[in-house]
Image (spheres, rainbow, N blue to C red):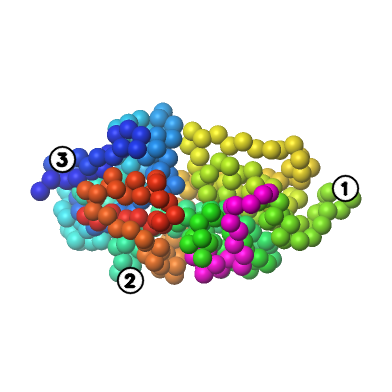
Amino acid sequence: MDARSLYFTEPRTVEVREREVPDPGDGEVLVRAERSVVSPGTEMLVYRGEAPAELAADEELDALSGTFEFPFRYGYAVVGRVAATGPGVDPSWSDRRVFGFNPHESHFCAAVEDLLVVPDDCSSVAAAFLANVETAVNLVQDGAPRFGERVAVFGQGIVGLLTTALLDDCPLDELVTVDRYAARREWSAELGAGTTFDVNGDELGERIHDHFGGGDSDDGTDSTDGADLTFELSGVPDALDPAIAATGYDGRVVVGSWYGTKPAALDLGGRFHRSRVSVESSQVSTIDPELRGRWSKDRRLDVAWDRLREIDPERFVTHEFELSDAEEAYELLDQRPADALGVTFRY
């Protein structure tokens, strides 16, 4: 039996390559994959050739130690079973179901410290969404919503919906969401959004800003309108400007989107100039410096497992593909995104 790995070979081109099943080294195990999840935001950048070729794929993950220069393997959410153990590994690891931050491939070797044991009460499909749930947990931690705040979330893809579900657990005054696709807005309302906005129409940011009510003082320094906290999770650079416009005086904008090589054009000459709005990036590879005294990645992952079981992201799956049909999967996400939400590979 050969191992199969997915390679991104050039823009909008993927292929599955075969190789010999590797043998685990010292301290490693061989994992036979069962399911992996496509992360549409990041992987569409990769698929379209919009990721900076010279950038490290991930400086924190050994399995993604290369760059985005074609050809390369990518993906970071695989669930499988331990098929063999290497020297120095406790035999009890054999046949354990594990999660790995690994590219899409049928077999891979990994150090046991780089794997996470999947809880018995969690399906393999649901567990494959762990990285997305961890991202949502990190976003909420970075945004630090306060009691009674008004929050807006731009983008209701997988990460956006998971973030909305987590925010629904917070004692907010109001939660509104934004997405161009009606099905995602419906999911968003089901997960706790009080109001959902379509991106179509004029002055999206102003519409959301005014939705929250309030008004400006004479000097504009104590406005109570606009969002207190806005998350930009759409992956679309054009969404950042209305996200800023939707945010009120002294509000915060957390940018979880990765735009790759696509620039974001901003109009900062109007209200923004006097509004003291802060714009901050959020990325799951690190933890907010203010939290590092008490929070570690292990602790954050424990929270992610708990929330994963509570939210059950398996319900977001719209399509399952054999790895051999990966080209069809990426074409679907690229050309018909309104039809797809959660996309997984079977092995």
Q: Is mark 1 on a helix, strand or loop?
A: loop
**Extreme residue toward the front, this view:** 201
Q: Residue furthest top?
A: 54
Question: Residue 19 — which label?
Answer: 3
Nearer-the-camera pick, 332 or 211: 332
Q: Horizontal and vertical percent for residue 62? A: 33, 41
Residue 332's disc is none
Circle 2: element type: loop
How far apart are labels 1 and 2 at the CA level? 56 Å
Amino acid at circle 1: Asp
Q: In this view, does 189 lie to the left or right of 101?
A: right
Using the rendered image of the protein, determine whether residue 167 is visible from the camera's viewpoint. Answer: yes
Marks 2 and 3, the one that precedes in the sequence: 3
At 31% across and 66% down in the image, what residue appears?
Answer: 123
- Spatial CA span between label 2 and label 3: 33 Å
Residue 110 position in % (x across, y down): 26, 47
Q: Which residue lies furthest to the right in this view?
A: 218
Numbered disc 3: secondary structure: strand
Binning the other alpha carbons within 10 Å of mark 1 as few (below 14), some (14 to 19) or many (20 upward) gives few
The numbered mark at residue 219 is: 1
Instruction: Read off the residue under disc 2.
Output: 121
The mark closer to the camera, 1 or 2, is 1
- Residue 295 vertical placement versus 21 (above, below): below
Residue at 69% from the left image edge and 38% from the top image edge: 267
Q: In this view, does 51 lie to the left or right of 279?
A: left
- Which quadrant does the C terminus fall into? bottom left
Task: Magenta stretch: give its range.
Answer: 187-203
Q: In percent of the image, x 44 and y 47: which residue is there?
A: 41
Q: Which amino acid does label 2 sit on?
A: Asp
The mark that comes first in sequence, 1 or 3, is 3
Is there CB contact under 8 Å for labels 1 and 2?
A: no
First in sequence: mark 1 vs mark 2: 2
